[in-house]
Amino acid sequence: NNRTYSMVKPHAVADNHVGGILKMIEEGGFRIVALKKTQLTAAQAGKFYEVHAERPFYGELCQMMSEGPIVAMILEKENAVADFRALIGSTDPAEAAEGTVRKAYAKSKGENAVHGSDSDENAAIESAFFFSGLERY
Ligand code: ATP
């Protein structure tokens, strides 16, 4: 599959890092298929991160993801899911490699600047959560 789903997290939107992050994404070889700014309710964030419901940070994660607007996008590139996760770097910014989005913009394990789907199956589910077929170009 050649598409993945990503979003710029609220702290990075609030700090005006959308342009810098999109620049890294485009220069990383990804084409933007769909893009919008929107805000999740805590309930919607809870649904999006349902797989993490049993993790100790779930409440904090849902709160953080709904505290302000996010920028949601579908991205296209050969090997999109794996290549995008390489571009964003480790979940923990202390472990993120030089040149990755999280090295540049993450503040903590939770406020780690961007989300990237972890499988083709989740990329399709997450893309459908945010975008209709008519919003993809
Ligand atoms: P994502 O799925 O968002 O791309 P990931 O696969 O790198 O991130 P996961 O382990 O799936 O990381 O965790 C999902 C999200 O939960 C992380 O991106 C982060 O925002 C948050 N998170 C993960 N671990 C912690 C933690 N220890 N404390 C607080 N928040 C965390």
Image (cartoon, rainbow, N blue to C red):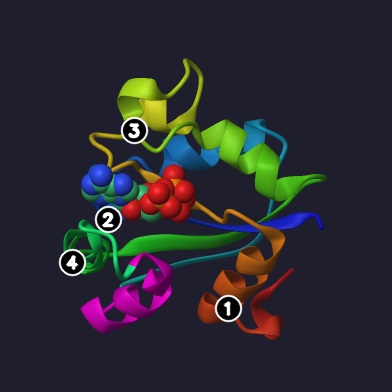
Labelled disc at residue 10 = 2
Residue linked to disc 1: 131
Residue farthest to the top? Answer: 98
Judge depth for marks 2 and 3 and give the one in front.
3
Secondary structure of the residue carrying tag 2 is: helix
Residue linked to disc 4: 59
Along the polypeptide, which appears first: circle 2 or circle 1? 2
> How far apart are the two marked residues, 2 and 1, measured between alpha carbons?
19 Å
Secondary structure of the residue carrying tag 1 is: loop
Q: Is there CB contact under 8 Å for labels 2 and 4?
A: no
Magenta-tinted stretch: 40-52
Along the polypeptide, which appears first: circle 4 or circle 1? 4
* Place of residue 127 in the rendered image (x, y in percent of width and height, measured from the top left): 60, 71
* Place of residue 30 in the rendered image (x, y in percent of width and height, measured from the top left): 70, 43
- Does residue 134 appear in this view? yes
Callout 1 amino acid: Phe
Q: Is residue 52 left or right of residue 10?
A: right
Q: Is there CB contact under 8 Å for labels 4 and 3?
A: no
Callout 3 amino acid: Asp
Q: Is residue 105 left or right of residue 88?
A: left
> How far apart are the two marked residues, 2 and 4, measured between alpha carbons?
16 Å
Q: Residue at x 31, y 76 (%)?
A: 46
Callout 4 amino acid: Gly
> How far apart are the two marked residues, 4 and 3, measured between alpha carbons?
18 Å
* Residues packed near mark 1 inside 10 Å, few (<14), some (14 to 19) or many (20 plus): some
Residue linked to disc 3: 92
Q: Tell me the quarter of the image containing the N terminus.
A: bottom right
Instruction: Check if residue 46 falls in the magenta segment.
Output: yes
